[in-house]
Amino acid sequence: MSDSKVQNYEYDVLSRINRGDDLMHIGTVDANSDELARVYARYIYDEEKWVEMYIVKRENMICIREVEPFFKKRVV
Amino acid sequence: MMNYTKVNAELITLIETIADNKFILGDRLVEVGVSGPNLEGTLAAIAMAQSELGHARLLYNWGESLKSGKGNKKDVKEQTGKAFASIVQIEEWIQLIAGLYSMNTALNILITALTSHQRGSEIELQFNKLAREQLEHILYSKNWALKLLNDGGSIPARFGRAFKLCEQEIITWLKQVENNSVLIENEILPVNSNLVNSYKEALIPRLRDEEIINAR
């Protein structure tokens, strides 16, 4: 049983504990479909009674500024 | 009075059959689910086990209150003997997904038929939260079923065979329920509930692919 034939995507999980709280990034899940990612997030991150919870496919996030590597490759 | 007792007995049998299968599924989700193929699948299986065991407890308590007329909350340590052999015999991940998918899909069809016919009744009240949570269990098992059917080697065929084994028992049971004259005459179930057909239509079409099931 391997994931080799099925492509997995990374999803970020965001949630809010109480109304008015900041939306927090609480973790990530790997899944091959939105449906499965939704169930994973709901059942894995169940330590709080969240009032709101979202999942975002990592590839749908738009990067504004990227972390620079510590050591840049020297071009000869 | 006689009729009332007969209806209650049939309803209790139905409730206990659902509860027993959920009780065993909860147990298997912990025992087998803990060695799932990936971290997310495993963690979700363990969390889902609590939910299945919770459903079983709720149904056992309801069955007890129907028997005794009061809300007894006794500790449940074992099933009443109505769980299906294919569910009791789950020993590995492929069988677990097959059992979870076939059983929860069938229960969803049955509960929808019961609650839509009994709006605002005790039956709808008892099944309401359970039915909502069960939809997530179906999403989980359906997506895992798709994953196994798209996997390589002998896995799709093994899954197909495990599923067929569960399905045979489930269809036999659904046939008995949809033809149960006591439940129909007392308007607990609609006359033409078509449980078996609805169940077959709700499944992933690929599970009807003979090539997958019969592959070695």
Image (spheres, rainbow, N blue to C red):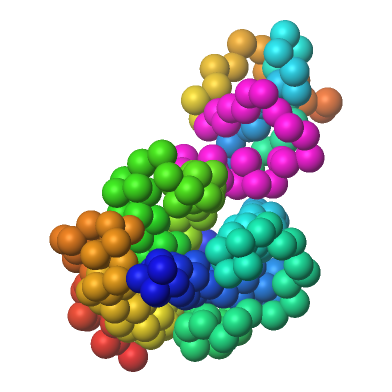
Compare residues B43 and B61 and report the one nearer the observer.
Answer: B61
Compare residues A26 and B124 and report the one nearer the observer.
Answer: B124
Relative to B63, is A39 above or below?
above
Toward the front, the furthest residue is B1
Q: Provide residue B136's location: percent of width, then percent of height.
A: 50, 48
Give the residue displayed 76% in from the left and 12% down from the top. Answer: A21
Q: Quadrant of residue B110?
A: bottom left
Q: Provide residue A23's location: percent of width, then percent of height.
A: 70, 17
| Residue range highlighted in magenta | A30-58
Q: Quadrant of residue B1?
A: bottom left
Q: Quadrant of residue B20?
A: bottom right
Compare residues B8 and B15 and report the one nearer the observer.
Answer: B8
Give the residue displayed 66% in from the left and 12% down from the top. Answer: A65
Give the residue displayed 21% in from the left and 80% down from the top. Answer: B210
Q: Provide residue B96's location: percent of width, then percent of height.
A: 54, 74
Residue A37 is inside the magenta segment: yes
Q: Is residue A56 left or right of residue B168?
A: right
Toward the right, the furthest residue is A70
